[in-house]
Image: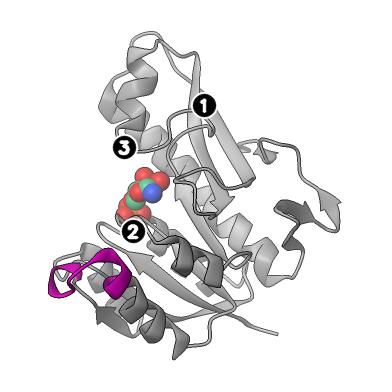
């Protein structure tokens, strides 16, 4: 069975690209039905079009409030009947109603080792705190911002003289490994959310998720 995905994006779309590539490489039994952006200028739209994926733009400025935007977004998504809804750099906070509707089939990637640094500017915050480690997390989305149960994390040690640019690049490379992997698990029906706990192959994952170890 092919897992039907809808991907929501707002910007560059490097994670979308990693997902497209993993599907193309037949690592992940999934198909992207649609890529939806709240930003008409997002480069991710070009990436999707180059891969032959249908794209849609729904701009929040055209809606009176968050609830109205989320209802319109939900209606658009419902037409594709996705098995999994993937947030890949979607820069909008979603309403509880929206999140509850997709609970257990809505995932996000966040550039920090959650629960550290929810929200923005995570790389700067890790550097400022002189953290020894930094990384990224894939999690099921719940109404709490960046607070849902973690599926998988990848960490890198922060080198003493690293820069914001280098750290950003290093974490992005890890993101491009763990997001396709989490989606692959879901598509293979190995990953589920039961009573707010992520299970992999029927077993609960550790509180910080599966620890991804870089192999090359
Ligand atoms: C990534 O850092 C991701 O963790 C965060 O938004 C960024 C999206 O980057 N949620 P891209 O658009 O996938 O390149």
In the rendered image, residue 179, in percent from the top left (x then y), is placed at 53, 54
Measured as percent of width and height from the top left, residue 3 is found at: 62, 79
Q: Residue at x 61, y 56 (%)?
A: 181
Q: How many C-alpha atoms fall within 10 Å of the one at disc 3: few (<14), some, or many (≥20)?
A: few
What span is colored magenta in the figure?
A: 60-69
The image shows residue 79, relative to residue 178, as above or below, that is below
Residue 17 shows in the view: yes
Question: Dot 3 corresponds to which residue?
Answer: 120
> Is residue 216 visible in the rendered structure shown here?
no
Q: Is residue 105 left or right of residue 78?
A: right
Residue denoted by label 2: 90
Real-space Cα distance between discs 3 and 1?
A: 19 Å
How packed is label 1: few (under 14 Cα within 10 Å), some, or many (20 or more)?
some
- Nearer to me, 186 or 91: 91
Local secondary structure at mark 1 = strand
Ligand 1 within 8 angstroms of badge 1 C-beta:
no
| Residue 148 located within the stretch drawn in magenta | no
């Amino acid at each position: 069975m092919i897992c039907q995905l809808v991907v929501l994006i707002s910007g560059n779309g490097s994670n979308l690209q990693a997902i497209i590539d993993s599907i193309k490489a037949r690592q992940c039994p999934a198909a992207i039905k649609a890529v939806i952006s709240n930003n008409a200028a997002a480069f991710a739209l070009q990436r999707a079009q180059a891969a032959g994926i249908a794209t849609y733009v729904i701009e929040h400025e055209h809606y009176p409030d968050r609830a109205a935007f989320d209802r319109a977004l939900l209606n658009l998504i419902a037409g594709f009947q996705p098995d999994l809804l993937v947030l890949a750099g979607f820069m909008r906070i979603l309403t509880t109603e929206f999140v509850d509707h997709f609970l257990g089939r809505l995932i996000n990637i966040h550039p920090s080792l959650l629960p550290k640094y929810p929200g923005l500017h995570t790389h700067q915050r890790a550097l400022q705190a002189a953290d020894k480690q930094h990384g990224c997390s894939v999690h099921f989305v719940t109404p709490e911002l960046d607070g849902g149960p973690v599926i998988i994390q990848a960490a890198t040690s922060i080198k003493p003289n690293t820069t914001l640019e280098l750290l950003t690049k290093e974490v992005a490379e890890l993101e491009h490994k763990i997001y396709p992997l989490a989606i692959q698990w879901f598509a293979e029906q190995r990953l589920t959310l039961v009573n707010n706990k992520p299970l992999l192959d029927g077993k609960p994952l550790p509180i910080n998720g599966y620890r991804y170890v870089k192999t090359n």
